[in-house]
Image: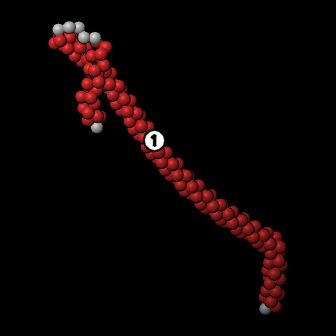
Amino acid sequence: MLDFSVTFLISIINIVVLFFILRFLLFKPVTKFMAERAKQVQDSIEQSEKDKNQARALLAQYQDQLRTAEVEAKAIIDSAREQAQLDAEKIIAESRASAEEIITRTRRKLEMEHLAALAIFREEAAALVVAATSRLLGREVKSEDCLSYAEMLLKETTAPSIEQDNT
């Protein structure tokens, strides 16, 4: 039995010595390796969280820029529409003014032509009256006297009809 106790005691001492040797040689390096590995994993997780947050910030920034660009594009389109409307109204107004000016000039021209034709008619009518008077009287009438009387008579008879035509 004594052999058993001594062997048992030596075995326990061997186990304790082996425990300290293994602890010094294996346990501390393995623990250190595991701690470093855990730190690397934690750093990787933190870095991925930072990258994720940065990506979210960039996404939000791009979305804001997109919204701003859409608002600016809408403002530009609205401005272009307003300018086109103003240009169209200006062109229409200029066209109307031009048309009215052409109509006014045409009316003046027609009035001038009418007055010129009337003057020619008066002269020809006066000459016809002088000729008719000369034939009726059987003698030559001075055309200057009759011409002035004929023109005066034609002016009196045609004046009311001209005023009616202008209205």
* Residue 130 percent coordinates (x, y): 23, 14
Quadrant housing residue 22: bottom right
What colour scheme has been applied to the protein in the rendered image? secondary structure
Q: Nearer the viewer, residue 158 or 6?
A: 158
Q: Is residue 127 left or right of residue 138?
A: right
Quadrant housing residue 53: bottom right
Q: Quadrant of the N terminus?
A: bottom right
As displayed, is residue 146 above or below residue 81? above
Q: Is residue 143 left or right of residue 67?
A: left
Q: Is residue 47 left or right of residue 12?
A: left
Tag count in the figure?
1
Which residue sits at x=49%, y=50%?
A: 78
Q: Is residue 129 left or right of residue 58?
A: left
As displayed, is residue 5 above or below residue 127? below
Q: Nearer the viewer, residue 147 or 17?
A: 147
Using the rendered image of the protein, determine whether residue 18 is visible from the camera's viewpoint: no
* Residue denoted by label 1: 90
Q: Nearer the viewer, residue 7 or 30?
A: 30
Using the rendered image of the protein, determine whether residue 76 is visible from the camera's viewpoint: yes
